[in-house]
Every structure is written in structure tokens, then in C-alpha cells.
């Protein structure tokens, strides 16, 4: 039962993230893109750049910042999935970047969104898988 609740909360955070991105002028390409390497929550376009977005959330205001959960291991996985997407959609050579959207509940129960643009670069990842 708790896993279903966590799943629903994650989906709520993703929907809020999509609304946020659209309000900032992004064009949604796909959501929950899966390959055998893993999943990317949101793939969008900002101008001529494809943006791979990882959404992290905390529902309790006193927890640590959710974006710290996008560690080197997660970054490597996201990079592999992004490469899969670029190849399968004939987008090799296309400008792209990785963003992190961190959603955290405030003490008042409202969502606070932190958008980390260009959060990491694949060439900077240490301790690869």
C-alpha cells in the first residue's frame, strides 16, 4: 500500500514539473521514456535544445534537498537512456542537456520548485558504472 502511495506522489510531482516546464515555454516531447538502461522522467524541447529532465521530490518539508539523489550512478544511467533516445529518434548531433527539477513541500504544504538547468554533463561524471 505504501508503494502505491509513493508511486502516486511521484506521478503528482511529475505532472507539476510538466506544468512548470510548459509555463516556461518548453515543449513536451515525451514522458517516462524507457530503455533497457532505465527511465527518464521528462524529455522536452527548449528552442533547439532537447532537455532530459529528472524529477525528484520530497513530500515532507524537513527532508534534505531532493536533487542530491541525482548522484553519479543516476547521472550515468540518465546519460545511457538519453543516448538511446537520441539514436532511436535520429537526433544524434542535436544539442541536448540534463536538467533536474526538485520539488519540495514547504512547511505550509505548498510545492517549492528548484530548476537546475544543465545540472550535469556526461563528460564530467566520475566513478562510472
Image (cartoon, grey):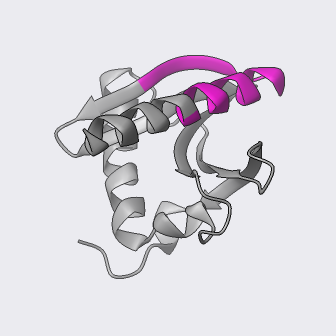
**From which residue to which does the magenta span run?**
13-31
The part of the image, by quadrant, that contains residue 29 is top right
Q: Is residue 120 left or right of residue 81?
A: right
The reply to whether residue 83 is visible in this rendering is: yes
Residue 67 x %, y %: 58, 62
Residue 73 x %, y %: 33, 68
Residue 60 x %, y %: 60, 58
Residue in the picture at 77% in, 57% down: 107
Q: Residue furthest bottom?
A: 127
The part of the image, by quadrant, that contains residue 45 is top right
For the N terminus, the quadrant is: top left
Taking depth in this image into account, of 66 and 90 the one nearest to the observer is 66
Taking depth in this image into account, of 97 and 57 the one nearest to the observer is 57
The reply to whether residue 94 is visible in this rendering is: no
Taking depth in this image into account, of 41 and 36 the one nearest to the observer is 41
Looking at the image, residue 84 lies above or below residue 72: above
Residue in the picture at 39% in, 28% down: 32
Looking at the image, residue 100 lies above or below residue 16: below
Amino acid at each position: 500500500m505504501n508503494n502505491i502511495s509513493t508511486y502516486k506522489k511521484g506521478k503528482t510531482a511529475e505532472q507539476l514539473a510538466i506544468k512548470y516546464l510548459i509555463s516556461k515555454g518548453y515543449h513536451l516531447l515525451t514522458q517516462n521514456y524507457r530503455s533497457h538502461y532505465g527511465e527518464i522522467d521528462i524529455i522536452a524541447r527548449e528552442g533547439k535544445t532537447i532537455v532530459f529532465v529528472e524529477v525528484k521530490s520530497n513530500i515532507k518539508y524537513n527532508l534534505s534537498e531532493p536533487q542530491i539523489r541525482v548522484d553519479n550512478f543516476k547521472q550515468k544511467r540518465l546519460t545511457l537512456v538519453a543516448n538511446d533516445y537520441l539514436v532511436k529518434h535520429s537526433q544524434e548531433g542535436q544539442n541536448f542537456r540534463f536538467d533536474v527539477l526538485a520539488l519540495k513541500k514547504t512547511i505550509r504544504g505548498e510545492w517549492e520548485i528548484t530548476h537546475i538547468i544543465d545540472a550535469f554533463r556526461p563528460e564530467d561524471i566520475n566513478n562510472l558504472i
